[in-house]
Image (cartoon, rainbow, N blue to C red):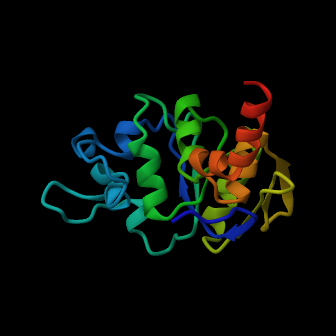
């Protein structure tokens, strides 16, 4: 379900690994489905579970960590351009992913699936991982209107960039089709004037 983005204040799930690719986010064997339902159950499947279905020692299986924000290492979402990776992240319940660098296509896939990719500096990311490790209840505030992300444990804040169109869509819970429908009267008027 699409939710409007405004100010998100949440604890975080830390994933301090670099170069996490889309096959690690959602293994290829799950790509046969064309419906977004159920993908969250298989987020990081091979890292979360053994072949027999028993749980492995992995952060998503650790009740110490929870929240709507995933904090990931540099170069998150590299590899193939599968949109299913964004489906899995959204399906699990993450609304924001914070990293110092995202693969371009994956970043767009997240935005198209109502997950906000927030790019921060390496120093801010390192500090954030440290705060979460010191206290798993550390809160992070993502202010979409102001385009800031704040580590509430230290008070440190950074500005993040987002395309104006995508920001508008996130803040109003609109996908591309919803946006066109919202502007249907304007489009039809323009067509009449320019026919």
Q: Residue at x 45, y 75 (%)?
A: 63
Q: Say above or below: 45 vs 188.
A: below
User: Residue 12 occupies which quadrant of the picture?
Assistant: bottom right
Residue located farthest toward the top when viewing the structure as drawn: 195
Please indicate whether residue 52 sits to the left or right of residue 168 in the image. left
Q: Position of residue 172 (x, y in %)?
A: 71, 59
Q: Is residue 133 visible?
A: yes
Q: Position of residue 191 (x, y in %)?
A: 72, 32
Residue located farthest toward the left when viewing the structure as drawn: 52
Task: Work out whether residue 175 or residue 105 is closer to the camera in this orientation and state it.
Answer: 175
Please indicate whether residue 87 sits to the left or right of residue 138 in the image. left
User: Residue 31 occupies which quadrant of the picture?
Assistant: top left
Q: Residue at x 59, y 35 (%)?
A: 102
Q: Residue at x 46, y 38 (%)?
A: 20
Q: Position of residue 150 (x, y in %)?
A: 80, 59
Q: Position of residue 8 (x, y in %)?
A: 71, 67
User: Residue 22 occupies which quadrant of the picture?
Assistant: top left
Task: Work out whether residue 163 or residue 118 is closer to the camera in this orientation and state it.
Answer: 163
Q: Residue at x 21, y 42 (%)?
A: 29
Task: Work out whether residue 55 or residue 22 is closer to the camera in this orientation and state it.
Answer: 22
State which quarter of the image contains the C terminus. Answer: top right
Q: Is residue 162 visible?
A: no
Task: Work out whether residue 11 or residue 80 is closer to the camera in this orientation and state it.
Answer: 80
């Amino acid at each position: 379900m699409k939710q409007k983005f405004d100010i998100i204040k949440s604890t975080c799930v830390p994933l301090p690994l670099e170069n996490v690719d889309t096959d690690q986010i959602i293994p290829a064997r799950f790509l046969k489905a064309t419906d977004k339902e159920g993908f969250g159950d298989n987020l990081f499947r091979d890292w979360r579970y053994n072949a027999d279905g028993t749980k492995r020692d992995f952060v998503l299986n650790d009740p110490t960590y929870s929240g709507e924000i995933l904090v990931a290492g540099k170069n998150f979402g590299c590899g193939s351009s599968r949109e299913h990776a964004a489906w899995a992240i959204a399906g699990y319940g993450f609304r924001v992913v914070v990293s110092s660098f995202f693969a371009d296509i994956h970043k767009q896939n997240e935005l198209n699936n109502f997950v906000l990719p927030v790019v921060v500096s390496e120093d801010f990311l390192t500090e954030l991982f440290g705060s979460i490790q010191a206290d798993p209840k550390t809160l992070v505030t993502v202010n979409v209107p102001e385009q800031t992300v704040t580590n509430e444990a230290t008070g440190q804040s950074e500005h993040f960039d987002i395309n104006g169109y995508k920001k508008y869509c996130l803040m109003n819970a609109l996908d591309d089709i919803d946006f066109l429908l919202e502007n249907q009267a304007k489009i039809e008027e323009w067509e009449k004037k320019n026919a």
